[in-house]
Every structure is written in structure tokens, then in C-alpha cells.
Image: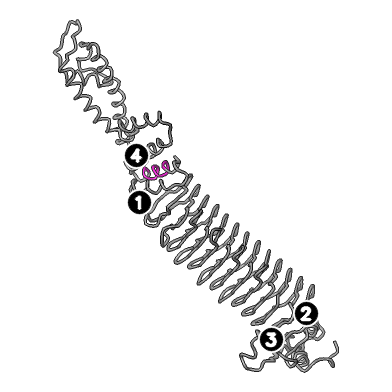
Amino acid sequence: MNVEDLTPPERALWEAFAAGESVDLGTGDPTLDSPAHGDRWGPERMIRAEVLLALLVGQIESAPGQIAAIRLSGARIIGALNLGHAEVTVPLALNGCYFDEAPHLYWASMNSVHLMGCQIPGLVASGARIDGHLWLEGSGITGGLWLDGAHISGILNMSGVHLINPQGDALLADRLTVDANVYCDKGFTAHGEVRLPGATVGGQLIFRQATLHNPAGAALYASRLDVAANVFCDGGFAATGEVRLRGAKVGGYLSLVGAKLSHPGRTALNADDLAVETDVYCSDGFTAEGAVSFAGARITGQLSLRGAKLANEQGVALSLQRLQAEEVMLRPAERINGICDLSFARINVLHDDPATWATRYQLDGLSYETLDPPLSAKERLGWIRRDTDGYQPQPYERLAQTYRSLGLDAEGRTVLLAKARDRRKTQSPPRKMVGWAQDVLVGYGYRPFRAASWLAGLLAFGTVVFSLHRPPQLEAEQKPSFNAFFYTLDLLLPIGTLGQEPYFSPQGVYQWIANFIVVAGLILGLTVAAGATRALSRD
């Protein structure tokens, strides 16, 4: 490049480059210096992109003892800055600048790049290798920011950045690798899809105070994202459109405290198959209009939904299907509006609250060790009976086992009795009749001492009948005196004799009555014995 062809602002930058000195073309008036009005800046603030290119690719060497760099403020960059496949060894720092055309850094090898507070009509850095930080703080980027396949050895700072590309990708960062933290906070705004599928972050990923807007699809698409430390989507985080974290890995904890997610009638948060090394917080004002799904997720610590508001009236509001977690704090601020799917989840401790139980559940296959609070069986049965699939045996068996493990055998029997009664409602009329008889007589075997009442009633009945109609006495050497009470008791006892039954033989209808008492005594006696055995042999 011929130095004689440089304009005054370009010459100032050219001369400052070798020593890495700063050049400020601003006026000092914040209104006039705003990059939003950069298209009005005149020649006194214009720098041709080809001048920047010539300096960056090494047309001038560093001054002795100095580090060359472009440090430029308040400039309007005209023309296309195309650094595709270039190898740049000096820092690039542009502050408060306006670009007429989108810079291209695709597959470039760069030193630190700072484009702070700039107005940029798109930035293409696909496959770029940046040995240092990429600092875009406070910039406005329209037309999309492309970082797919890029590798940044330092920090990616997008604090306060405004990305505007509502019909496409606001941020395209598929397979992006950042060795340190990624900041999308402090008012970060995106109109269009923010894409991070397969991205790797060596530090923390921070979306605190960010606003994402893409109602037609995914606001944040981050499937298979791998973050070594924590992920923060809190502190005023809001997303209109799906937040997709399916198959993501988080080495620390995931915070969605107070986040506002909206995707009505569809999925607001998709965290299926998510893996988190510690805790997940969807709590303290977390609101989701649309489905929240942690199906198949693996959470080493706690999943907290304390104080959350979940609504998806026409479908599943919360899916914890196949979830594996140490604890689940399922105590939202209000009743879950929609189905809560806990089917086949494996949870060590499940905390809930009857006041905020969902109106509909799916509980088949749910496994847990402890329920908090420890409600009575009658209260917990109200929880099980909210299952949208109707009668399923497993939830009753699991609840009964939990009570038995706590030594509450009577509560466990109450649950199993309810199971039998609820199953009866699904059976054919003949089986319903048999079941009804079993229930009335012995409570399906779970109310064994009810049989004792029937035994007492039969004893009284037989005593009265045989007192009024004494059976004939059989021929025998010993002829004991007849006693209606002991005769009836002798019929009722399934084993042994009281010396009455062998010597008296009722006739006609009274023989049928005696036979009925014998059979009933056998069945009811065995039921009483079984109940007594269970009561005396608790673990």
C-alpha cells in the first residue's frame, strides 16, 4: 500500500501501529460518537478496510521494544475487512467503531480480537483460531454472528451484545470451543436463534440477565453442549421460544433461578438426557409457559423446583420421565397446571407438598426411597389416584414397600387394600362380585381381623339355630351332653375337637347350615391366622 494515498485519519493509524498506540477519532460528544449514527460520520472519521488489512498482515513491523497493535476508537470502517485464512500475530482492538460491511475472519489465525461497543452488520468467524480473547462487549451485530467451529483460547465476552437476525441465526456457534468462560450477560439480547450445539466451554457459561427471542423455534439451541463448570441462566434471564439443552453436560451446577421461559403449547425447556454433576435450580420464581422436560436426565445432586410456576394446561407441564436424581424438590409456588410425568424416574428423596400437587400425574414405574413429608396412606392414595393412566399396580406396590420399610405395616396394608379395590373397578361384573365379597369378608386379606367379627357372628348364629333345633345324637359309648355354643364352636374350628361335633348329626337344612359353618370357619380361621402372623413378625 502506498503511504502517500492515505487520508489523515488513516495516516494517524498507520503511524501509531508500530508502537501499538491508540487512535481516537471521536468528538467527545456521546451522542455524535454513538456507533448507531456511524453511517453519518464523514471522511474525517473514515478508515478503509484495506488499510487495516495491510497493517494486520505485517506490512509494518513493530517498533524496537514495542508491540505493534491496532487500537482504534470512533472510526467508520468502509469496505470489506476480509481476513479469511489470514495469519495475524498482532492484537486488533476497535472501540466504538461503525462497519459499513461485515468483517470476515473465517479460518483466520488471530491474536486477541476486541470489537467493543461497535455497530457491525454481521461477523463471520467460522473456523477461526483466536489465541487470546474475543471481546465483543456492548456491540450491536445484525445479520448474524458466525463462530461455528471456531477455537478461542481465552474468554468469549458478549456482555451487553445485541444480536439482531430475527429470520435466522442470531448466533451460529455449532462446535465452538472456548477454553475459558463465555459471557452472554449484562443485557445480552438476541432476536433470532442462538445456536451452541456441540460447543465446548472450558469454564463457565453465563447468560445472566440475558433476553432471547425466537418465538417460532428455539431461542437457545444447545444440544450436546459441554460446559466444564457452571451454567447460569438466571438473574433476569428470559427466553421466548424453546431453550434446548438436550444431551448437554454440565460439570458444575445449572441455575435457572427466577428465569422466565415462554413457548405456549410447546416445549419451553428441553433438558432431556441432560447430565449435571451437582444441582439444577429451577426455583425461586422460575416460570415456564409450555412444557419443561428433564426426561432421561442424570442429576448427581438435587433438582429444585421450589417456588416455580409451571403451566402447560393441554399437555405435560413437567416431565421427569426416566430421571435419575439424588433429590427432587417438587414444591412449586402453585399447583402445576398440566400433567406431571414421573414415570420410571429413579429418585432417592422426593419432596412434595399436597397443596401444590398437579391435578394429573403419570406415576407408573416411579421408584423412590423416601417421601417427604411422610403423609398417611390415605393422603398418599389421593396422590396415586391422580394418575392419568388410571389403575396401575406398580405405584401402589412402591408406596406400600416404602411404608413397610419404615415399619408402618398397617399403612402398607391400607395401600395394598386400596390397590385391590381400585383394580376391582377395572374388572368384569362377575369378578367385581367376587372381589366385593372378598372385600366385605376379609378386606382382600389385608383386614384379617375383620374375619374374627364374622367368626363371632357365625358362632352366635349357630348357637341360636342349634339351640332351637338340637341335632340328633349318634349312637356311641360316650354320650356327651349337647351344648349349642360348643357344638357351633367345634364346627368353626378348622383343627381339633371339643367333643361335640362327632356325636351329633343335624338333618336336612340344618346339615347344610353346619356344612356352611365348617367351610366358613376354615376360610376365616386361616385368614385370622395369617393376619396374626404378619402382625407378630414385622421386620
Circle 4 or circle 3, nearest the eye: 3
Q: Earlier in the sequence, mark 4 or mark 3?
A: 3
- Specify which label sits upstream in the sequence, 1 or 4: 1
Q: Is residue 449 left or right of residue 201?
A: left
Judging depth in this view, the residue of 121 and 505 nearest the camera is 121
Say which quarter of the image contains residue 231: bottom right
Q: Identity of the amino acid at label 2?
A: Ala
Q: Which residue is mark 3?
A: 38
The N terminus: image quadrant: bottom right
Residue 132 is inside the magenta segment: no
The span from disc 3 to disc 1 (Cα, nearest Å) is 66 Å
Q: CA distance from mark 1 to mark 4?
A: 16 Å
User: What's the image's color scheme?
Assistant: one colour
Which residue is drawn at the image coordinates 17% and 15% (left, top)? 469
Q: Which secondary structure, mark 3?
A: helix
Residue 80 numbered mark, or none: 2
Q: Amino acid at mark 1?
A: Pro
Instruction: Provide residue 152's location: percent of width, then percent of height.
Output: 68, 71
Could you tell which of marks 1 and 2 lies nearer the N-terminus?
2
- Residue placed at 59% from the left, 76% from the top? 159
Q: CA distance from mark 2 to mark 4?
A: 79 Å
Quadrant of the image for the C terminus?
A: top left
Q: Nearer the viewer, mark 2 or mark 4?
A: 2
| Numbered range of the magenta stretch | 396-404
Which of disc 4 and disc 2 is earlier in sequence?
Answer: 2
Q: Using the numbered discs, state the Cα–Cα distance from disc 3 to disc 2 in whole angstroms.
A: 16 Å
Name the amino acid, label 4. Arg
